[in-house]
């Protein structure tokens, strides 16, 4: 175990006290490698200004910010999530440590084997520490158990200022965010109830401020502590004696903890020798709770979504319980009436586990026996509408779960017989209206169904049309020529579940056309006689065939885009992920004109995306501290009050107004610098609360829409891939690019890592080169990209080589000369621009390059730059598809056909046919990639291939 400590400190309106608290950490308690994480929880006083001062004095401070006040628990949890080390010490922003006390406390923890190490005494003082009066203190027991915590208030949790392991925080489920001012009480109880060993160090103390309007006091005036602590105990109430359960949640509910705990302690259940020792927690004290069977529950079944959602929820729960031999409990739901299911009701509150659309990666895999370690004693939440190939191995069992009880079946079978009596081939349509009409829940035009019917109707044997709809009167008229039948026409009445006749009849049709709805999709899954199933495809604007046991229940907007992309690539396989949003991030200072390019690409993306833009000056610290030795510095000529001085700031403000839901801008207060680039790249991570692709887009790195879609699809098709490396076209002039690899700007060991599969709670360890880390089960941080990345050759094969305009404008060289200390950068670069004979060695012109890097013209490489000078020779323009965008004002103009012709006609390339017999080298793969790009762009018309053979004939 690493022995460095992550100090954490929640801060809310504490401008008058926080400086003294921080000083008490830094003076005698902080060693090299430690960190202090302060979360400003939406303070409205001068706390932020004090924090900026503290950060200048103590660069090791990491600051996070909640835009609005969320409370102590969320602030503490944010801090712990972003902590680097496995040992955490929480100090409130008004309390004070004794110099030299933390190193002793840490040694005590490590030698005693404790999970929590507490100072023996909590000494209270008013205003100044000198005001401490002897005897005004709490003294904690040598070992605190959970039984102790239910007998007295004088427990470490009531203090909250102690050293603990991050593992104990994870095991406890963090600080309870519902508990308000009692969050540390609740956290201490959670720790003890989940096996934490809590010990106090002899002859030690810290100082706890009292006598002013503290967070605890403010909250206590408005809330009942007994009610909040009872809520904390809910998941563990099976360990409490029955008489005290009745008391806590009965007559004593408002006073049991706050007023009478000392005189009426809570007792735990009696000893039970049959309790398995491997489940015994010493922190429970001198008790042995009874064994409880492993169980899974779904407390939201019946309320989290409509009928089809409940079908998938219940199916997942039953299959999971069956495969892993677990007991099952549910809440009330309509399936108890329709299908006769009678599982026990949920008897206790359990920790919640969400489905893969949010938190847990491998839950779908766990449908297969022994595929993963099963979850036990948890409450599942979600929709579980995985690709149905996950359910296919359990098809018979799945279908058996949803057979109606005899009383319902009798009514329905009469209707089915009546329907089949009207024809030999029953065609069913589901026309979802009602709550539909947005995003993936689109209204499918009736014309699509009519066109499809016209194509198949004449070839069917005695067809009859059945229509199911939640607004039948609004849609049936469009199909009058087919004499449609409805469930109402068949005389079915099922008042307890009026929707079910439509569902059941769809499951009995010979051919079914559904809406983009899990309702009719689930009916198709239960249809054992169906010969053809079709569904609407938004982009193709028609109905397409599908297999109910090998597809997604709902084609979400992003899936439809992915499906179209797969078809364009000639793929026949079904896509493998329901959703994979992309979060782009850019750190920028003076980003004109490049900053104007990216939105033109992003706004064309057919899936969910967000662009996080972090603007401002980064101090030359951490990853960029190397530039100080070269003379790098921050001068007033490169910024205005810590922000851009070239119009970038104003452009970003305008962009945010145009795309408020897709863009977030992060800035420091005016005049304040970022604590290095690492703080800048970490700024957006706290706002990303879903699994996604995280994509670094430097302001001068230009990607195309097609490249982004292709990359995203690669991650979808390969769900175990964690990151992606790329090559780039590295521009050192408007028409000059680096033409060699494994050299400057093309070091495959560190360039260019740009995309990661992100999960909440990951963080940036470094920015140069980028290193995104995830906390592993061992309590250590691990490099995400090191696990299973796409390598350079894999991305290049898909045409994923972006254009990097690193040195194309004199302002870029001026900045690098000042900020990075590149001596004579402008002069050297200017000499390169005057060169007319290429290729040349870059080191001959650029003093900071020392290897064999070669430079050639983009024209010679057959490359059409995305960025080029406009016709006036002053402004710049971007090539986006068949259009050009002026970088000055984002005005879109058509590319001149004459200009295209001039570009193409000026270039002739001859390829010796022998190349295709000897094209297995690294440089040959580069040329193969170029040839493929030329075919796509049309430039291949300028390429001549000789027919010479290897033998010379």
Image (cartoon, rainbow, N blue to C red):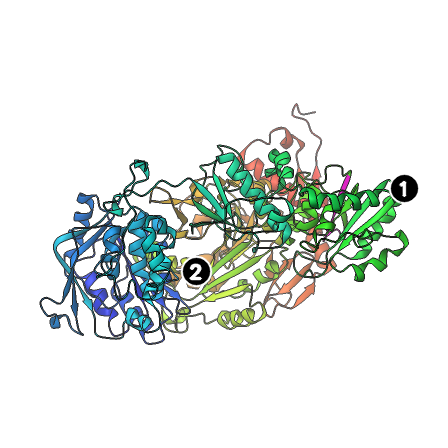
Left or right side of 912 for 348: left
Q: Which residue was labeled with disc 1? A: 462
Check if residue 634 falls in the magenta segment.
no
| In the foreground, 463 or 289 | 289
**Magenta part of the chain:** 532-540
Callout 1 crowding tier (Cα within 10 Å): few <14, some 14–19, many ≥20: few
- Considering only vertical position in the picture, is 745 above or below 373? below
The C terminus lies in quadrant? top right
Say whether marks 2 and 1 touch (CB < 8 Å): no
The N terminus lies in quadrant? top left
Asked if residue 775 can be seen in this view, the reply is: yes
| In the foreground, 450 or 641 | 450
- Considering only vertical position in the picture, is 850 above or below 24? above
Left or right side of 273 for 124: left
x 27%, y 75%: residue: 213
Mark number, residue 893: none
Image quadrant in which you'd find residue 927: top right
Left or right side of 102 for 485: right
Name the element at disc 1: loop
Image quadrant in which you'd find residue 872: bottom right
Left or right side of 860 for 457: right
Q: Which residue was labeled with disc 2? A: 827
- Residue 834: x and y in percent read 52, 57
CA distance separating discs 2 and 1: 85 Å
Name the element at disc 2: helix
């Amino acid at each position: 175990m690493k022995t460095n400590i992550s100090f954490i400190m929640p801060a809310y309106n504490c401008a008058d006290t926080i400086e003294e608290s921080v000083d008490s950490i830094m003076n005698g308690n902080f060693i090299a490698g430690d960190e202090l994480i302060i979360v400003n929880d939406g303070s409205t006083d001068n706390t932020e200004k004090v924090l900026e001062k503290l950060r200048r004095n103590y660069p090791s401070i990491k600051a996070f910010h909640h835009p609005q006040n969320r409370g102590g628990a969320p602030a503490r949890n944010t801090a712990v999530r972003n902590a680097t080390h496995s040992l955490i010490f929480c100090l409130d922003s008004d309390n004070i440590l004794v110099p030299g006390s933390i190193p002793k406390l840490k040694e005590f923890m490590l030698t005693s084997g404790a999970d929590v190490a507490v100072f023996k005494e909590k000494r209270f003082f008013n205003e100044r520490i000198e005001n401490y009066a002897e005897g005004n203190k709490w003294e904690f027991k040598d070992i605190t158990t959970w039984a102790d915590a239910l007998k007295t208030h004088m427990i470490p949790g009531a203090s909250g200022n102690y050293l603990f392991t991050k593992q104990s925080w994870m095991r406890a489920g963090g600080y309870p965010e519902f508990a308000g001012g009692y969050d540390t009480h609740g956290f201490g109880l959670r720790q003890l109830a989940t096996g934490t060993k809590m010990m106090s160090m002899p002859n030690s103390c810290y100082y706890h401020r009292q006598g002013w309007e503290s967070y605890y006091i403010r909250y206590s005036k408005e809330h009942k502590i007994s009610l909040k602590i009872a809520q904390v105990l809910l998941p563990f109430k099976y360990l409490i004696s029955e008489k005290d359960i009745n008391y806590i949640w009965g007559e004593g509910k408002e006073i049991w903890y706050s007023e009478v705990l000392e005189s009426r302690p809570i007792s735990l259940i009696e000893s039970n020798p049959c309790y398995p020792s491997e489940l015994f927690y010493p922190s429970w004290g001198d008790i042995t709770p009874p064994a409880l069977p492993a169980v899974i529950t779904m407390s939201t079944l019946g309320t989290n979504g409509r009928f089809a959602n409940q079908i998938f929820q219940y199916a997942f729960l039953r299959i999971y319980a069956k495969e892993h031999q677990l007991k099952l409990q549910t809440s009330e739901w309509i399936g108890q009436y329709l299908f006769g299911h009678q599982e026990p009701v949920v008897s206790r509150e359990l920790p919640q586990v969400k489905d893969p659309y949010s938190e847990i990666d491998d839950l779908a895999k766990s449908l297969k026996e022994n595929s993963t370690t099963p979850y036990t004693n948890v409450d599942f939440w979600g929709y579980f509408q995985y690709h149905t190939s996950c359910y296919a191995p359990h098809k018979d069992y799945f279908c058996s779960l949803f057979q109606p009880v005899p009383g319902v079946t009798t009514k329905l079978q009469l209707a089915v017989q009546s329907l089949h009596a009207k024809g030999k081939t029953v065609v069913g349509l589901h026309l979802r209206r009602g709550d539909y009409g947005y995003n993936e829940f689109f209204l499918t035009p009736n014309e699509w169904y009519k066109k499809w019917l016209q194509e198949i109707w004449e070839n069917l044997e005695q067809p009859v049309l059945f229509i199911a709809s939640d607004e039948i009167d609004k849609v049936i008229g469009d199909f009058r020529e087919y004499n449609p039948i409805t469930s109402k026409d068949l005389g079915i009445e099922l008042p307890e579940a009026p929707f079910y006749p439509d569902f059941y009849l769809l499951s009995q049709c010979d051919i079914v056309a559904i809406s983009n709805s899990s309702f009719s999709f689930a009916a198709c899954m239960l249809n054992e006689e169906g010969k053809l199933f079709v569904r609407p495809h938004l982009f193709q604007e028609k109905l397409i065939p599908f297999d109910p046991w090998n597809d997604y229940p709902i084609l979400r907007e992003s899936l439809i885009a992915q499906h179209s992309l797969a078809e364009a690539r000639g793929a026949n396989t079904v896509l493998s992920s329901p959703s994979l949003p992309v979060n782009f991030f850019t750190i920028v200072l003076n980003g004109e004109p490049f900053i104007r390019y990216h939105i033109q690409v992003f706004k064309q993306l057919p899936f969910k995306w967000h662009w996080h833009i972090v603007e401002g000056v980064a101090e030359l610290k951490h990853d960029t501290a190397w530039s100080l030795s070269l003379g790098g510095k921050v001068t007033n000529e490169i910024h205005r009050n810590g922000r851009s001085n070239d119009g970038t700031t104003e452009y970003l403000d305008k962009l945010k107004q145009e795309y408020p839901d897709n863009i977030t801008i992060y800035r420091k207060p005016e005049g304040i610098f970022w604590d290095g680039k690492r703080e800048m790249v970490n700024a957006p991570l706290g706002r990303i609360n879903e699994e996604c692709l995280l994509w670094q887009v430097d302001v001068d790195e230009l990607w195309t829409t097609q490249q982004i879609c292709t990359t995203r699809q690669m991650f979808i098709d390969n769900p175990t891939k964690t990151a992606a490396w790329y090559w780039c076209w590295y521009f050192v002039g408007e028409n000059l690019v680096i033409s060699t690899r494994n050299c400057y700007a093309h070091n495959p060991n560190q360039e260019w890592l740009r995309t990661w599969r992100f999960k909440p709670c990951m963080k940036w360890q470094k920015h140069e080169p980028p290193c995104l880390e995830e906390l592993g089960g061992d309590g250590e941080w691990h490099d995400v990209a090191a696990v299973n990345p796409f390598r350079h050759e894999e991305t290049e094969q898909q045409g994923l080589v972006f254009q990097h305009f690193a040195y194309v404008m004199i302002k870029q060289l001026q900045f690098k000369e000042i900020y990075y200390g590149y001596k004579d950068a402008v002069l050297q670069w200017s000499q390169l621009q005057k060169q007319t004979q290429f290729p040349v060695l870059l080191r001959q012109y650029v003093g900071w390059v020392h290897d064999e890097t070669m430079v050639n013209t983009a024209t010679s490489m057959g490359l059409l730059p995305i960025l080029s000078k406009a016709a006036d020779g002053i402004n710049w323009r971007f090539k986006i598809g068949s259009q050009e965008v002026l970088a000055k004002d984002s005005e879109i103009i058509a590319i001149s056909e004459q200009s295209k012709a001039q570009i193409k006609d000026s270039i002739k390339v001859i390829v010796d046919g022998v190349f295709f017999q000897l094209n297995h080298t690294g440089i040959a793969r580069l040329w193969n990639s170029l040839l493929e790009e030329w075919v796509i762009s049309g430039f291949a018309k300028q390429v001549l291939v000789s027919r010479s053979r290897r033998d010379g004939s």
